[in-house]
Amino acid sequence: MLLLSSGRIEEGDWTAALVESVETRSLPAALVARGIVGATELQGLVLAAVHDGAFAAAVGEIERYVVDERIDPPLLPADEGLRPDVLLAETARRLDALASSSLSPYRDRVVPARGRQPAGLGAERREILAHATGRRTARDLAFALGRSLHPVTVEIAHMLADGLLEIAPAATSFKCTHWGLAALRPRVEIKPDTQVSLRSSEV
């Protein structure tokens, strides 16, 4: 997802590589063969995604989980793998780096600080300010920017400390933006045959 959302890979190229990988059984090889990304760069992106996924799990909450005994190989595997102790150590380091900040990447929504008109900001901070509507958390901003959660969270924490951002009040965070629309219809029980029909349409 990071490759697509960041614009690093066009959706058409990604789809074409997926089709080619059906025969070669290797999506990395298809991406490299098409010149979309180099093998070394791709492995770096894979490892970065694994580290960021572990960080995202550590700062969030797991409401439920399902144990699946199937072992399906990932589309983009890490060639040399990653030892659990190394992954845990890196995750702990990232958590420690944010220990002094009370920012919750999944709960706190941020908005540009009132009365501030900062000048001379870098592109990264300008992008964050442009997307900080008061209804987006660090996780939402990372997705909107096509970037990893950890670096975005760190930058937002720095911007809070620098007075460029502030935690949005509840009135801003949960403000309805669809005034005048009819209320949602009450939930109704779905019959088994209707469930089958819905699932078929989603495939």
Image: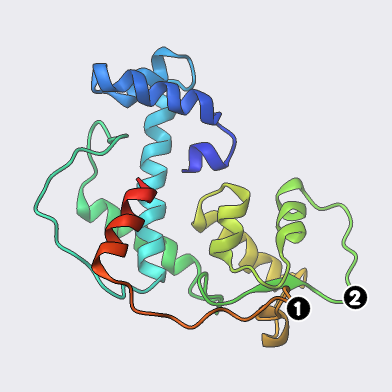
According to the image, label 1 marks what residue? 180
Give the residue drawn at x 73%, y 55%.
Answer: 125
Nearer the observer, 12 or 122: 12
Element type where label 1 sits in the image: loop
Which label sits in the foreground, 2 or 1? Answer: 1
Residue at coordinates 31% horizontally, 63% vertically from top-left?
A: 194
Q: Quadrant of the C terminus?
A: top left
Disc 2 marks a residue whose amino acid type is Gly
Q: Is 116 situated left or right of 102 in this image?
A: right
Cβ–Cβ under 8 Å for marks 2 and 1:
no
Identify the amino acid type marked 1: Gly
Question: What is the quadrant of residue 28 in the picture?
Answer: top left
How far apart are the two marked residues, 2 and 1, measured between alpha carbons? 31 Å
Q: Which residue is mark 2?
A: 115
Q: Nearer the viewer, residue 136 or 191?
A: 191
Looking at the image, is 42 positioned above or below residue 107? above
| Residue 134: image tag | none
x, y percentage for residue 173?
67, 79
Q: Which callout, 2 or 1, points at the residue further toward the start of the chain?
A: 2
Residue 154 visible? The answer is: no
Q: Residues within 10 Å of mark 1 (few under 14, many from 20)?
A: few
Q: Circle 2 sits in a helix, a strand or a loop, which is it?
A: loop
Q: Residue at x 43, y 80 (%)?
A: 187
- Residue 5 percent coordinates (x, y): 56, 42
Residue 117: x percent and y percent? 90, 65
- At 53% from the left edge and 79% from the top edge, which residue is drawn? 185
129 lies above or below 17? below
